[in-house]
Image (tube, helix red, strand yellow):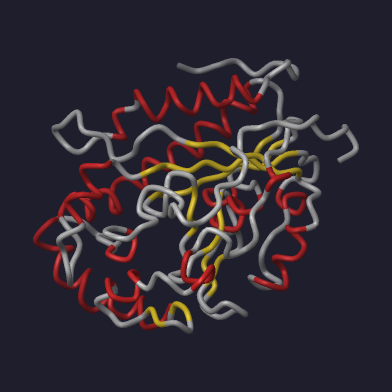
């Protein structure tokens, strides 16, 4: 239903969270074809201040091409990020696989991400209709992938790094983001002029949730990778991508009608699949607020 734009209102983080939860719960796009089964379970939201210094650090870590919130939206005050946990039944279907993803996983990757794009546009429009400037970077003009950067393949706005800035998780050996709902998920974000209470105060260290970096006790994602792209040295993005293109997509895209089947083996049947590994200390819940940033931030 269309909403007529008006002047800024007193939108709160609870209002926004309820809107995102309802969209994920009720939208037909979050369903397998001909089924009531969802691609994604209930989302988790986090917030970072637009002027958080970490966004400028990303120009060094990700690359000088990575945008800051205020490059994307000069009036930006907050960055909102969400985690869409992949449904349990889909994760379970992928656990026995050793070379290719299960069909539910391939469908989630191919058709669940377009739903995530719809969510990005919906949140952007919902905020604008309430008088708050907003932009969803990944569906905005100018967003692009970059083949070469300090971290290899990257993009002009990284959803994983936005989520990390919001305190939603930390990075793993396989380059994923381990959140309180684990590593099997999709991520999205919106930059907005709406002041919201940041959840980044308890942001974990970059690798805090990964047991391998804690005490070397876990190498399950290494064992799960059919491409041999994960080692104790980290994740080889190029080797991973070659496997995705020449094996996974080449094998499954036609027969299953899944143009981007993905893989996800390193995200399932691992201790961090749907949680922070038990031996890793869990930080304060990301929803715990502190006072919102002032109008000048």
Query: Hey, which residue is sitting farthest right in the picture?
Result: 296
Q: In this view, does 8 lie above or below 236?
A: above
Residue shown at 55% from the left, 52% from the top: 281
Whether residue 10 sits left or right of residue 117 in the image: it is right
Residue shown at 77% from the left, 50% from the top: 70
Q: Which of the image's four quarters has the N terminus? A: top left
Residue 155's image quarter?
Answer: bottom right
Q: Where is residue 136 in the image (x, y as percent from the top left)?
A: 58, 44
Whether residue 258 sits left or right of residue 242 in the image: it is left
Whether residue 218 sits left or right of residue 15 in the image: it is left
Q: In this view, does 154 lie above or below 24?
A: below
Q: Total marks drawn? A: 0
The front one of 276 and 267 is 276
The front one of 144 and 181 is 181
Q: Which of the image's four quarters has the C terminus? A: top right
Residue 261's image quarter?
Answer: bottom left
Residue shown at 65% from the left, 60% from the top: 205
Residue shown at 60% from the left, 46% from the top: 283
The front one of 294 and 222 is 222
The front one of 101 and 221 is 221
Q: Position of residue 54 (x, y in %)?
A: 74, 58
Residue 43's image quarter?
Answer: top left
Q: Position of residue 81 (x, y in %)?
A: 58, 43
Q: Position of residue 169 (x, y in %)?
A: 55, 52
Q: Is residue 137 above or below residue 147?
A: above
């Amino acid at each position: 239903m269309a909403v007529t734009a008006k002047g800024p209102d007193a939108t709160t983080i609870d209002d926004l969270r309820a809107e995102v939860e309802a969209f994920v719960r009720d939208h037909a796009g979050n369903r397998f074809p001909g089924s009531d089964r969802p691609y994604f379970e209930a989302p988790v939201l986090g917030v970072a201040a637009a002027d958080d210094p970490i966004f400028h650090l990303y120009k060094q870590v990700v690359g000088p091409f990575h945008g800051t919130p205020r490059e994307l939206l000069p009036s930006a005050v907050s960055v909102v990020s969400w985690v869409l946990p992949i449904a349990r039944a889909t994760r379970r279907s992928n656990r026995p696989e050793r070379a290719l993803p299960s069909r539910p996983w391939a469908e989630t990757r191919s058709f669940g991400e377009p739903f995530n794009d719809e969510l990005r546009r919906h949140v952007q429009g919902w905020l604008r209709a309430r008088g708050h400037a907003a932009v969803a970077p990944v569906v905005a003009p100018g967003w692009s992938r970059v083949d070469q950067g300090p971290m290899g393949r990257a993009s002009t706005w990284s959803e994983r790094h936005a989520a990390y800035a919001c305190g939603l998780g930390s990075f793993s050996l396989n380059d994923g983001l381990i959140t309180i709902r684990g590593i099997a998920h999709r991520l999205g974000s919106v930059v907005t002029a709406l002041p919201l209470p940041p959840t980044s105060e308890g942001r974990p260290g970059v690798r805090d949730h990964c047991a391998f970096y804690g005490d070397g006790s876990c190498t399950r994602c290494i064992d799960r990778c059919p491409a041999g792209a994960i080692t104790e040295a980290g994740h080889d993005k190029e080797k991973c991508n070659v496997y995705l293109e020449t094996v996974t997509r080449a094998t499954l895209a036609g027969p299953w009608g899944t143009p981007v089947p993905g893989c996800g083996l390193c995200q399932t049947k691992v201790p961090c699949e749907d949680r922070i590994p038990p031996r890793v200390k869990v930080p304060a819940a990301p929803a715990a607020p502190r006072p919102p940033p002032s109008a000048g931030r």
